[in-house]
Structure formats: C-alpha cells, structure tokens
Image (cartoon, rainbow, N blue to C red):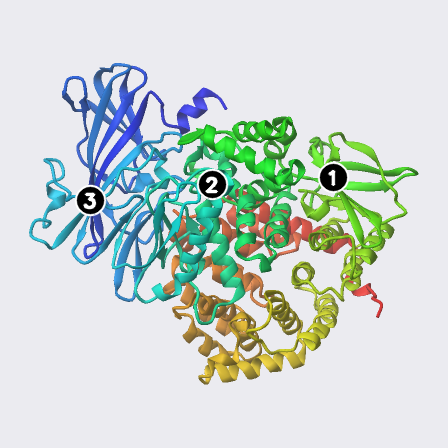
Amino acid sequence: MSEKALHHYRLPTDVRPRHYDLTIRTDLEKERFAGFVKIDLDIVKATKVVTFNSANELELGLATLVLASSGEELTPAETRVDAAAQRISLVFDEDLPAGAKATLRIGFGAALTDSMTGYYKSTWEKGIYALTQFEPTDARRALPCWDEPLLKATFAVTLISRKGTVSLSNMPARPDTAVADAHTEALFEGVNVGCWHATSFETTPPMSTYLLAIANGDFVHLESSYISPLSGKVRPLRIYATSDVIHQAQYALDIKQKALPLYEKAFDIEYPLPKLDTLVANDFDAGAMENWGLITGRTTAYLVDPKNADIAAKKRIAGTQSHEVAHMWFGNITTMKWWDNLYLNEGTTKVIFGVTILIHPEWKVDADFINMHLTAALRLDAKLSSHPIEVEIPDAGQIGQIFDSLSYSKAASAVLRMLSKYVGEDKFLMGVSLYLKKHLYSNTVSRDLWEGIGESTGLDIPTMMNNWVSKMGFPVLTVTETASGINVRQDRFLEDGPARPEDNETIWSVPLGLVTSSAPGQGLVDNTALLVTREAEFKLDTNKPFKINADTNGVYRVLYTPTRLAAIANEAAKAESIFSLSDRIGLVHDAFALGKAGYLPLSAALNLVHELRAEKEFLVWDSMDLNLAGIIHTWWEDDKVTQHLNSFRRALCSPLIERLGLEYSGNDTADTTQLRTLAIAGAATAGDAATVQALLDRFSKYIAGNTSAIPVDLLSVAFCTAVKHTGAQAYDAVLQLFEAKTPSIKVAAIRGLTSATDPMLQARTFDMIQKSVRNQDLISFFRGFATNPMAINALREFFEANYDSINTRLETTFSMKYIVQSVYSSFAKEEDRAKAEAFFKNKDIGKYNQALAQALDGINAKAAFIKVREKVAAFQFGD
C-alpha cells in the first residue's frame, strides 16, 4: 500500500499517546455521559498538527495542549474535522519540537444510545445500564483517542456514577478516594454530598484502545478465584450480571476458573492483571469481547439454567469463555499491528481446543472442530469472493467485514491446527510461547509468529505458511493410484467446479498426513509428508487401506476415484477401522463438497452416508445430517426432490430412534443425548409422522404446565415442530416464552416462531421484529426464517421493504452483513441473483459488500448444481 493511501486512512505517527488519564460521569437517568481526558503525548517528529480520532456523535469541548518542558498551555489556531475518517486535527501556530512531551486536555460528552457500540445503554426490567464495545474502531465514540491497535498506551480511569450503582473497568478499584481538579470539578458534582460516587481504578499495562472497557449499572456478581501455577498468586474472578439472571452465571465462572491456569501452563506466561471479571449484557452485538480484565458478552454466551442445562448451551459457553480468556494473552499482551493481521489475535483457537478437551473430554472438541469451524471456513473460502487471511484493509470502515469464518475458523483454527499437527503440538506451543514472550505488550505481524514457531522447530515456517495466509482459497488434492503408490495433485477448490487457470495459480505447502494400515484394524500416520509442488508421487501399498489427511487436520479437500472412496467407506464402517473419528467426519464433508462442486457424482456422497448408517458416534452423524440438510435446502423449491431426500433422511434417523428411544436420562452420556436429539430432529424435520406426534404430545403437556415434558435439549425441535404443524395455537404459546429469562428457552422460542408456515403468522413475527425485538436478536430471527422453506421469499420481501429502517438500526454493528447473507443465501436461481443485484445497485454496501458477493456466489453455485448435476430423484440405495 502506498504511503499516500496509508496517510488517508491511518493516523499520522509523528505524535503518539503514552498515557490516558480518563474521567467519565455516567448519568443513567438522563441517559448521557460526560468526561474529561488528559492524554500524555510523545512528539516523535516536529509538527504543527496533532491528529486523533473522534466520532461525529461525540461532543468535544475546547482542546488545549500543555508542553511538559515549560508548562505553557497552547490553544490550537485551527481545528479541522474529517467526519468521514472520524478524525480531528488540531493545528498550532508553531511546530511542536521532536522529542518533546506534551499533554492534550479535552472535555467530551454524548448520549447513551442503543447502538451496541461505543459507550451505550442496555435495558432490563428495572431500567438501563451502560457498557462499552470498542472493537474494532469504536473507542472514538466514547472518548477522543488514538484509536488504532499499534498506538498502545496506559489508562488511568475514574468513573463517577449515581449512588447505589456499580462501576467496572479493566483494573481493580483503588482504595483511595478520587479527587477532582480544576478540569474535572463539574464531573464530580454531587460526590461530596453522597448522592454520587467516584471510583478510581489502577493503571492498566500498555494496551490498545479497543481493549479499554467501562460499565455502570445495578450489577450483582458471583465470585471465585484461581491459584497461578507459575507464581502461586491467588487472583479474584468475578462474573457480573443483573439480579434477575445472575443465578445462571455460575457455569461460565467455573469455566474461567479452570481455563486460566491451563493457559498459564500452555503459554508459560502468568496472567498479568490483578483480576479478571466478566459482565453479561442483555444487548450485545458480537457474541463476546475480550476487554483486558473485563470480558463482556451477551446472555446466550454466558448464561445457562444450572438446574436444567442443555449440552448445546454448555458447549457454547465453554467455547466462548475459553476463547475470550485466551485473548488475555493472544491479542491483549501481544496485539496485531493493524487489522490485516486480525487472525494473530484470533490465533487462540488451537489452544482453546486443548484447554476445552481437558475441561470436558467427553465432548471430543478436537473432532467437533471439523463440524463447527473447519467446514464453515472451507465453505466460505471455496467462493471466488473469498479473501486472504491476511487481507489489506486500508479503510477502517471495512474492518468489520473480516470478522468472519476466514479470520476465525480458517486462520485462527484450521491453519494453525494443521501446522501444529505437522510440527508436533509440544513444539508448536513452545513456539507460541517464544512469540508471546518476545513481543510482550507490543505489536506484531505474521512473520513474528512464524519465526517463533520456526525457532522451536528448526523449520522454515515463514516459507511454508506464506501462501496459506497471503493467498485466498485452498486446494483440492486429486489422488491417482500408480504402480508404486499414489500421485497427488493440488488445484484450487471452488464450490462451482474446477478453477480456471487464472484462478488456479497458487501452490500451497500441504502436509499430507498419510494414513496407512500396518495390520487389520491398526493404522500408521506419517505426518512428515509434504506436497510443495503442483503434483508429486508418494510410495505406499495401495492394496491395503489408506487415506490422506489424517484426523482431517489439513485445510483442503481430497478427491479419490469413486472406487477408492467406496473402499475407504467400507473400511471406515468397520467397528475396528484404522480411520479415526475425525477421519470419518472429514470423509463425509469432503464427499458432499466434492459432489456439489461436480468433482464426484453426488450419489457417491449419499452412498457413503448409507455405508456409515451403523455409525455409533454422534459427531459423524452430525456431519452426515448437516450435509444432508444442506442438500435438501438447496432443492427447497422442488417438492419431488425434497420428498425423495426426506424419505432417505427418515430411513437414516428412524433406526436411531428405535435404538436410543425418545426418553432422556440423567445417566446418558453426552454422545447419547446429542445423538438422540439429532435423530428426533432429523426425523421430525423430514416429516416422520410418529416422531412429529410424539413431539406434539410433549408440547401440549409443556404448555399446560408440565415443563419436564420436554427435555431442555429438545426444546428447539419441539417448538419448531409444534408451530410448523399446529399453527396459531402453538405460535401464541411459544410467543409467550420468547421473553423467558433463560437463554435456552428464548433461543428455542425464536426458532419456533420462525418455523411458521402460515403467512399470517410470519407477518406477525415480521411486525414484532420491527417493533419490539432487540437489535442483537435480529440476526437470530433472520437466520431462523432463512432455514424455513415456506418463509424464504417472504423474508426477502420483508427485508427489502424495510431495508432503510433495518440498516439504520444496525449501521454501527457487525450484524448487517449477517442479515444480508441470511436473506439471499438460500436462493438457487439465476433470476434471484439478478433481483438481488438490482436491489442493491444504488445502495451504499461498503460495510457488507463482501458478504453480499459471497451470497451471490452461493446462488451461482447452487444454480449450477441444480442445473447440471445428476438428478437426486434417480438415486437408488441398497438395504
């Protein structure tokens, strides 16, 4: 990127912040905040201009600059406002000399809005409270600052609030009493007479502005602690929420307590702050946020009924809490220099799986990763509209678009997981530790991480990993059997078929992970084999079972001939197969992806599922059901095809129900509970009459007051089935449950409401979305409708008719890109793509143009699949 382009989008670095002394007064009754900040600056290069970030809605007072050497107070001769870039430039009459130190002083204020960004309000039954969400570029909505990750500084925060409320920030409160000075005297009004309270917090370590956090409200908390395995220090841990839901926060607190010492051991670096709090919010745009010392997040990310906890909720909470805690090292101690290296912050996920395995080994999270993360990443990266992991982002307005499956699941999880398996997990973690220790409290780029792992392994990691992060896409490996082994060729994989030459130029360094058989039921794994050219031969005995991509650790698809795939499926179906749980999951995902893209006949994928019908593991069934549901949804407009596929789905699920039964027991394993839920959901969705009736009977008892009639793991399935099959009566009952305090019930209610097939009921939900649904919940409603074949067209009509109001509600959040994807990704006709293009033709799509392009690519791929692939209705299966 040119220096000119950098200057246009990035702050000048001739003046850098060193320390913020920040005072903020929060008035929850008037729904406003006011503040004053003193920012200590280093003048790196002589300049007359001091430029910083401030959002347009932030009201600024008169700014002055005090030179440390003389104490002289300077007033700017001119103040320039760049509203588009959210920057203020103070122009002084004379140069500020290089090497000088100065302090910028400025007052500010704004309303507390429901924007879910900056310093904003959240509502609950007793009023409002306030909290911050600054990532990626919204600290500037709460205070004037240098709002870029590279420009780290320390923060000393004082919060002034009404008596009886609780104030929180990154660091612990200081025991001494905060004192006003001439600049903050007005902010302290009422403190001396006791109706307001001032809380000062200890100074933070150097950190980026997006990690600063404050909150004020009527919070209560649960408390615990952990003992550092490195120093023996005891650190307090708290989780805050409002009083109506705090009883559901214990599980999240327990996960945090267990995770922290495990991370200290993994990184060999002690958690550096004196405490770690979590605040649960009713209104929150993202799932959660890793503010240093004060993690924040939405209710579904942290709350679960302790007396009736479903496995899906516990998995979600454990994953979220572990992820945010890991950020205390990855991202907080060591931070990317700019958002093009976001994945360096999100690189925690590989370690997260190791931590979660230790906390909940029964969940088999390393294998579950394939269903949860790898598949999502490969699905997005198989589009021409994908982007590299390390993507150029000159414009801060574009940053929100890269918080996607590529930055999280592909980069932070899949690529690093693949690397760790190739070099060995112990050496990988050693390299990560070296990286963190070398760059404590500083900023990094990709090469810094690769050099750390290279130092621990002795390998040329930068060369190996360069194309994985700098180029978009991933390969499909075509396996051809030869007289002495196999020939493996790599080409870029695209969801709509083989890549054109101009889209197929990248050569990746691909760890092959060769699985071979040493004896019946005994497998050997060679993790050293590496494909670094377009194609190469590898020696092995093809008369024995073999497979590429051991444990599905690689970020690629593998294409075998139908004959070899059938042989692999036969081996995978054996009780004592050499192929692991993760191997079998990957085989299913590969077969369906290759079938949809035209590399394989889709019948090969469906026959693989048929071959694996005796599978005992939930996660393999989950991979089969996810893919089968996706195929059915592709043909949502073709009744004949969907009926045929639903018949196949019923044939798969019914034997599972017969084996596992419909009743849940406290003695069930996690696998049994999840597999039973999957089987019931699959059978009901496919229209199995007996299963549907059983769920309707349970629902009738539930709404009559017998809440034990529906196990919590079955709530979503039961609510959806009842609304779908009985209409208004069930809809009204589920609507009453939407305001439940328990997130699991609320999530199930949203799924139920969006399952309505009656256009009148759909219209009631659309009206509710416009009038009373929280902004944070919009995406859940849209996603629910997007999976309902009877609502897909209505959803598009509603969105397009109400685009302006929806866009206004979400203009400062990440959510709009997900809304756009939900509305358009289900379509599979070229005319639907044309309609979408026409609708967005004259709209400002700058904040979601990538999401729109990806949705349109998806329409193209599905249209091609339906048009030219073999007819599903013609498939035949054996017994």
The residue tagged with tag 2: helix, strand or loop? loop
Q: Residue at x 34, y 37 (%)?
A: 209
Q: Amino acid at mark 1?
A: Leu
> Disc 2 to disc 3, how far (Cα)?
32 Å
Disc with the residue nearer the chain's start (2 vs 3): 3
Task: Say left or right for 867 vs 160.
Answer: right
Mark toward the viewer: 2 or 3: 3
Q: Position of residue 100 (x, y in %)?
A: 25, 17
Going by the image, does 386 lie left or right of 751? right
Residue flagged by tag 2: what amino acid is it? Gly
Residue 10, quarter of picture? top left
Give the quadrant of residue 185.
top left
Residue farthest along the front direction in this orientation: 232
Provide the residue designation for mark 2. Answer: 846
Q: Which residue is mark 3?
A: 34
Element type at mark 1: loop
- Which quadrant holds the C terminus? bottom right
In the image, what residue occupies the spot 53% across and 75% down?
A: 711
Residue 84, given in percent of the width and then of the height, sits at 36, 35
As displayed, is residue 573 above or below residue 115?
Answer: below
Task: Quote the CA–CA distance across marks 1 and 3.
Answer: 58 Å
Nearest the eye: 22 or 820 = 22
Q: With 741 as the anchor, is 30 left or right in this view?
A: left
Q: Secondary structure at mark 3?
A: strand
Whole-angstrom CA distance, mark 1 to mark 2, is 39 Å
Q: Name which residue type carries label 3.
A: Ala
Residue located beneath label 1 in the image: 512
Q: Crowding near pointer 3: few (<14 within 10 Å), some, many (20+)?
A: many
Name the outermost residue toward the left: 193
Circles 1 and 3: CB atoms closer than 8 Å: no
